[in-house]
Amino acid sequence: MIAGVRVSVIVSAYNEQETILESLTEVKLGQNVGKGAAIKAGLDQASMDFILFQDADMEYLPKQYKKLFEPIRKHNADLVMSSRFAAPDYTCVVYLWKKWVTTLSYFWLIFLIILHLLIFIVVTC
């Protein structure tokens, strides 16, 4: 992983005690309330710098975790998602809302300038 970085690993499981590592802290919910509720309960208990979600069937091997941190280290990524399908090692995504906010800000500025000019023309006439 990245030196000095602490990671909480959330493993949602139901009747899969045999596959879960012994070093994990268990959060019991009493009954099967679904994966979403299990993840929420895990998030409430997570206290590390980063949170990693792992299936109890160990579909993703813990030795692959280091690869998930490459975009964080190299590109200061806020979120990293993995896929079991063939894909490039990682892809950077630009948030569309940032482009929209910038574009809307320019339109708003142009609108205010035109409005100001119209008011100036009306007042001076």
Image (cartoon, rainbow, N blue to C red):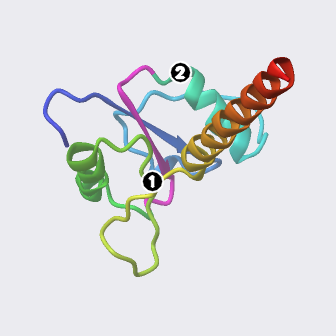
Q: Which mark is residue 115?
A: none
Amino acid identity at mark 2? Gln
**Outermost residue, front side:** 125
Amino acid identity at mark 1? Thr
Residue 101 horizontal side relative to residue 24, left or right = right
Q: Is residue 55 magenta?
A: yes
**Residue stretch rendered in magenta on the structure:** 47-58
| Viewer-closest of 73 and 4 | 73
Residue 114 horizontal side relative to residue 58, left or right = right
Residue 124 horizontal side relative to residue 28, left or right = right
Q: Position of residue 113 (x, y in %)?
A: 67, 32
**Residue topped by disc 2:** 45
Mark 2, Cα crowd under 10 Å, few <14 / some 14-19 / many 20+, is some
Q: Is residue 43 above or below residue 39?
A: above
Q: Position of residue 49 (x, y in %)?
A: 35, 26
Mark 1, Cα crowd under 10 Å, few <14 / some 14-19 / many 20+, is few
| Viewer-closest of 107 and 82 | 107
| Viewer-closest of 98 and 11 | 98
- Quarter of the image where one finds residue 5: top left
Identify the image quadrant of the C terminus.
top right
Q: Position of residue 121 (x, y in %)?
A: 79, 28
Q: Nearer the viewer, mark 2 or mark 1?
A: 2
Closer to the chain start, of discs 2 and 1, is: 1
Q: Which mark is residue 19?
A: 1
Residue at coordinates 16% horizontally, 26% vertically from top-left?
Answer: 4
Please tell me whether mark 2 sits on a helix, a strand or a loop.
Answer: helix
Residue at coordinates 58% horizontally, 53% vertically from top-left?
Answer: 96
Residue at coordinates 61% horizontally, 47% vertically from top-left?
Answer: 103
